[in-house]
Image (tube, rainbow, N blue to C red):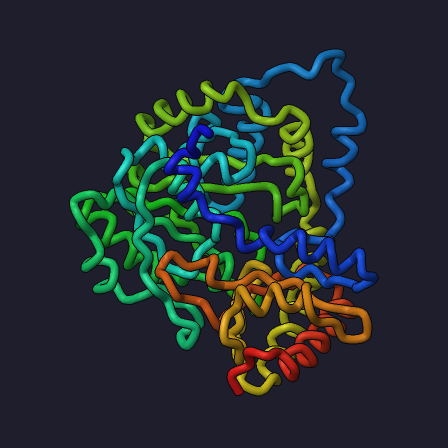
Amino acid sequence: MPSISQKGRQMPESPIRKLVPYADAAKQRGIKVYHLNIGQPDIPTPEVALNAVRNFSGKVVEYSHSAGNPSYRKKLAEYYKKHNIHITAEDIIIGAGASEALLFAFQTIMDPGDEVIVPEPFYANYNGFAVNAGIKVTPIVSSIESGFALPPIADFEKSITPRTKAILVCNPNNPTGYLYSEEELETLRQLVIKYDLYLIADEVYREFCYDGHTHHSCMHLRDIENNVILIDSVSKRYSACGVRVGCMISKNKEVMRTALKFAQARLSPPSFGQIAAEAAIETPDSYFTEVLQEYLSRRNVVVKAINSLKGAFCPTPKGAFYVVARLPIDDSDRFCQWLLESFDFEKQTVMLAPASGFYSSPGSGKDEVRISYVLKVPDLISSMKVLEEALKVYPGKTI
């Protein structure tokens, strides 16, 4: 029997999706499952985007330019100007989601065996993208006690080797919801200059900042224009995860010329996704005002509920729509599977993402879970009650 590739064996399972069979089985038993495991918003996609697809009048669904439709990229450049990010259409390559855009970035700037430093916990698929590109993730641990603030600069410096090519940050952060300050980004700027590194900034949650806090883009940092690569997406901004449209942005002309070759090799990004995404730029500001207020209410429900549980703790996130919570449990993977396989409260249970999958350091996150507060407030209240009851009877509880 032919063997599987080493890369295939190394590719990690998604901590977000690997428990789906257990959730499906629970539903077949008549259990209501509250999905807090995945960042799939229930906010309606803007009508302007949906109508653009419904009203498509073309007779052929053609390939687009490999970098994305010129009209969309020009319109995107105008969107970024509103956020004080001054770029041109030529500085943008559209990808099939931020996922493909990040893969383009990895493949463009790193050779197999090169290293990227990432504060952890981090978006779980970074591990998968790294395996795909043949590179190594070097994790720098941030702590729940600090709210997952940027680790000290000394931790970064002692991890830099001759193979280190880049630092990757997600801001606001998935999975923690942490929003990096201007001062923290300045620390990264100094590191980038000192060691001549790339700075990859995953900023897909830019619009989701709370309590009066402001998002600061890595594209605003001085004197490192040729070092910064911005990764972005329409998935969460417009609650349009299924259109699979994101982008890679850089003012570094050599980086963009090289990335375009990878884009050409996969032909073009999704046509209907680009049609929807281009139209979505016309979404009125009132849409985001309402969405932010809704997520703020949801965040407050979850944070208050978790911190009222004996032995549990989670910081109050300033952005995105996730929390990482520490629970009095022995093993988050075991606990999350047990919730679906062996527990229900009044014919209800919750699906969480074990935080162990958001770390690269072995053994980390074993008593932590990621919760996506993407359900309506009444459902979140019910799901937090279910979690409270589960922790009372979980066989592996630690208090």
In the image, what residue occupies the spot 32% across and 65% down? 151
Viewer-proximal residue among 68 and 163? 163
Query: Residue 38, relative to residue 88: is it above or below?
Result: below
User: Looking at the image, how many numbered discs can be counted on the residues?
Assistant: 0
Q: Position of residue 114 (x, y in %)?
A: 26, 40
Query: Residue 40, relative to residue 106: is it above or below?
Result: below
Q: Position of residue 65 (x, y in %)?
A: 53, 18
Does residue 310 appear in the picture of this structure? yes
Viewer-proximal residue among 244 and 58? 244
* Residue furthest out toward the top: 59
In the visual, does 93 lie left or right of 53?
A: left
Which quarter of the picture shows residue 254? top left
Q: Position of residue 269 (x, y in %)?
A: 56, 26
* Residue furthest out toward the front: 1
Query: Residue 10, relative to residue 298: is it above or below?
Result: above
In the image, what residue occupies the spot 36% across and 32% down? 107
Viewer-proximal residue among 169 and 77? 169
Q: Position of residue 206 (x, y in %)?
A: 53, 52
Query: Residue 353, relative to residue 230: is it above or below?
Result: below
In the image, what residue occupies the spot 51% across and 65% down? 213
In the image, what residue occupies the spot 52% across and 68% down? 332
Does residue 315 appear in the picture of this structure? no
